[in-house]
Amino acid sequence: MRPWSSIPIAESHESLVALPVDLLRLEPHPYARLGAPYGAEADPFRLRSGVLDRLLQAQGILSEREPTLRLAIFDAWRPIDVQAFMVEHTIDALCLERGIRRDDPSQAAAVDVVMQDVARFWAAPSRHPATPPPHSTGAAVDLTLATVQGGQPLEMGSPIDAIGSVSEPDHFALAEEVPERLFHQRRTLLREVMVAAGFAQHPNEWWHYSYGDQLWAWSSGVSTARYAEAPIKSATA
């Protein structure tokens, strides 16, 4: 359970809407490329209409502050089936990286550690209506900064979805070396423009922001979240 999991949800019934073409998308979509089960009609580059409004506000704020930069969208709406797929994929990948076999009973304790590490970054694919994963609501977006000319993503100190403390928003806050200080400045810039538009940041992830979900309500001191799981049928072009 997350600290925000107990916050009640009063669904607003806003539709999922497609991101406009003037918002940069990082394609091919990373999870679709892995074979995640989106289905033919499930475009991941969608958000609730109120969330998209704020994302466009954030882009405007960034353009005023740093005209050479733009937001680059890594992921947005994520069905629960995709969440489940990616949790399993991430556990498998981290086990492989650490030389752990999930099917070996003698390594069960090591597998448990991997699962705990993954759980800090990936929400459980809960189908309970009171605890939807943030991205399944259409309220959350994973994004980074990129150049206006060429759309080249900036180096932020860790890849999106990296498992470990290096992905925490303030990991480089006390850094003394130039590259690390630059990573902190870029993460801070991203946070400032997103927060100015009304978003809340995930405490473990420099790239994850949301508006209207339980995490946002918890972070903002709001008693009720606005978005439950968003059904595919609510998506509009």
Image (cartoon, rainbow, N blue to C red):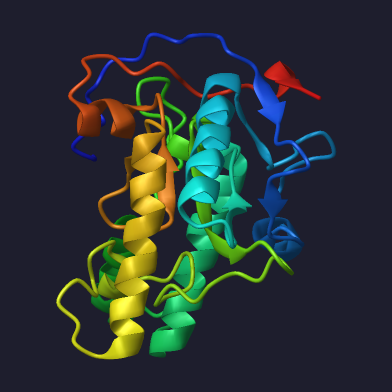
163 or 124: nearer the viewer: 163
Rendered residue at 42%/37% (across/down) = 210
Whether residue 97 sits left or right of residue 7 in the image: it is: right
| Residue 10 place in picture, x, y as percent | 38, 8
Q: Quadrant of the C terminus?
A: top right
25 left or right of 118 in image: right
The foreground one among 66 and 16 is 66
Q: 226 and 67: which one is in front?
A: 67
* Residue 132 location (% of width, % of height): 42, 30
Q: Quadrant of residue 68?
A: bottom right
Please indicate whether residue 31 sits to the left or right of residue 154 in the image: right
Please name the residue shown 23% across and 65% down the image.
170
Expressed as whole percent of the image width and height from the top left, the position of residue 84 reads 53, 48
Is residue 228 placed above or below 52 in the rendered structure? Answer: above
Q: Where the N terminus falls, by quadrant?
A: top left
The part of the image, by quadrant, that contains residue 158 is bottom left
Residue at the (35%, 21%) spot, across then down: 130
Q: Residue 19: where, in percent of width, then height?
A: 70, 36
Q: Is residue 121 visible?
A: no
Q: In the image shown, does 194 or 171 lie closer to the viewer?
A: 194
Residue most toward the left?
A: 174
Q: In which quarter of the image is residue 77?
A: top right
Q: Which residue is drawn at 71% across and 67% down?
A: 149
Using the image, determine if residue 226 lies above or below residue 82. Answer: above
* Residue 113 visible from this viewpoint: yes
